[in-house]
């Protein structure tokens, strides 16, 4: 009987020992997971951020390639991650572009809602034609300046001014562009990438928005010494057939339209960016950042690049300096469909 009791006591002791050992192991493992949990989340977030950034860059590059293809042609990108995270950005950017394209006058057009204001310095502006997606309306003005109302403007707007000599002297265009937003889920929020007008704009949950790639506005000098400005706008249409469950993303060209293609003077470019207000200053700094350096050094006579049209902030738009010098101007509007 004593041996039997001794065996039971030993068995109980062994069970208690194993139980305590298992409890210690569980406590240690739990502590390890508590310690390394944040590191595992960081690794997962970094992987998601990296793959999302690369995928967004690839999609943006492919849209730019498709936009330059003949109308109706395109390409396909296989990426389930993008297909699940893609949302449209409606009216993401609005660009207003104008320049003198003929004659000797300096004309300025302002479009505010449905109110059109035309002013010519030498008072030669005579006829104004306003074209939208629906129709073309013609107005006569006196003494080179005038205000008039154009109701029910739809889509992109084109305004041409003809002077008293029958010369097309000025052109104004207003173009609204759509884009794409990509959302990648992280542990503390979403990593967002906006693809708008050729630009790539990234936002991490704990950081401010940063423009990684800018719209295609460039200035250079041709071999004969003539300044040249080129601007390529991109409108992205996400088809109603697009689905968050597909893995193949189709990108088709919808063709392109030439908005300016001639020698011009007195350029004014204005743009409105929907969403976060810190995007526009980054655009401005990218294009006119050197102007302030030349201004501070009292060397504006040597400056041949983009600068503010009015206030240094660029709120009145940007222009090419010197503004009254002729330059070769090419503006193209490209469109792609994503589905």
Image: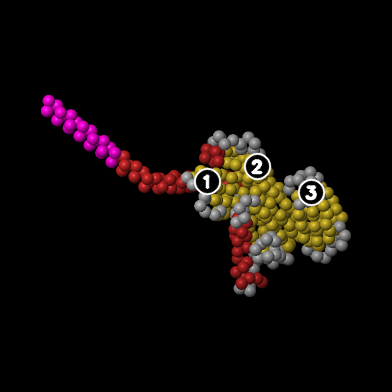
Q: Where does the image place residue 25, in percent across and percent down from the top left?
A: 29, 40
Q: Quadrant of the N terminus?
A: top left
Q: Tell me the SS state at disc 3.
A: strand
The residue located at (28%, 37%) in the rendering is: 22
Range of magenta residues: 1-24
Q: Quadrant of the C terminus?
A: top right
For this orientation, the residue located farthest to the bottom is: 298
Mark sitting earlier along the chain (2/1): 1
In the image, is 324 to the left or to the right of 289? right
Quadrant in which residue 85 is drawn: top right
Q: Tell me the SS state at disc 1.
A: strand
Q: Where does the image place residue 217, in percent across and percent down from the top left?
A: 64, 56
Quadrant in which residue 106 is drawn: bottom right
In the rendered image of this protein, does residue 166 appear above or below residue 184?
A: below
The residue located at (52%, 44%) in the rendering is: 184
Q: CA distance from mark 2 to mark 1?
A: 23 Å
Residue 244 is a magenta residue? no
Q: Which residue is mark 1?
A: 190
Q: CA distance from mark 2 to mark 3?
A: 22 Å
Q: Residues within 10 Å of mark 2 (few under 14, many from 20)?
A: many
In the image, is 149 to the left or to the right of 29? right
| Foreground of the two, 115 or 5 | 5
Foreground label between 2 and 1: 1
- Residue 100 visible here: yes
| Foreground of the two, 71 or 319 | 319
The residue located at (76%, 57%) in the rendering is: 110
Q: Which residue is mark 2?
A: 237
Q: Which residue is mark 3?
A: 131
The residue located at (86%, 57%) in the rendering is: 141
Q: CA distance from mark 1 to mark 3?
A: 41 Å
């Amino acid at each position: 009987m004593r041996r039997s009791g001794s065996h039971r006591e030993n068995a109980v002791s062994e069970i208690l020992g194993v139980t305590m050992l298992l409890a210690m192991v569980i406590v240690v493992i739990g502590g390890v997971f508590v310690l390394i949990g944040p590191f595992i989340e960081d690794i997962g977030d970094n992987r998601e951020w990296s793959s999302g950034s690369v995928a967004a860059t690839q999609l943006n590059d492919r849209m730019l390639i498709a936009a330059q293809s003949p109308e109706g042609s395109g390409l396909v990108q296989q990426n389930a991650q993008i297909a699940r995270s893609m949302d449209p950005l409606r009216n993401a950017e609005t660009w207003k572009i104008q320049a003198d394209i003929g004659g000797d006058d300096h004309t300025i057009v302002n479009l505010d809602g449905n109110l059109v204001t035309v002013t010519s310095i030498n008072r030669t502006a005579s006829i104004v034609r306003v074209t939208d997606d629906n129709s073309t309306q013609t107005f006569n003005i006196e003494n080179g300046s005038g205000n008039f109302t154009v109701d029910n403007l739809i889509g992109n707007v084109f305004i041409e001014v003809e002077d008293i000599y029958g010369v097309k002297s000025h052109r104004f265009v207003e173009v609204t562009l759509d884009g794409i937003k990509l959302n990648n889920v992280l542990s503390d929020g979403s990593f967002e990438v906006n693809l708008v007008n050729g630009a790539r704009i990234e936002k991490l949950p704990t950081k401010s928005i940063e423009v990684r790639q800018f719209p295609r506005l460039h200035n250079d000098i041709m071999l004969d010494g003539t300044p040249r400005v080129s601007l390529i706008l991109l409108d992205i249409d996400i088809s109603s057939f697009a689905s968050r469950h597909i893995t193949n993303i189709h990108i088709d060209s919808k063709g392109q339209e030439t908005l300016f293609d001639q020698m011009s003077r007195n350029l004014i470019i204005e743009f409105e960016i929907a969403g976060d207000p810190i995007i526009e200053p980054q655009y401005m700094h990218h294009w006119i950042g050197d102007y302030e350096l030349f201004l501070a050094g009292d060397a504006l006579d040597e400056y041949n690049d983009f600068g503010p049209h009015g206030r240094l902030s660029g709120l009145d738009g940007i222009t090419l300096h010197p503004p009254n010098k002729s330059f070769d101007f090419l503006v193209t509007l490209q469109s792609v469909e994503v589905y």
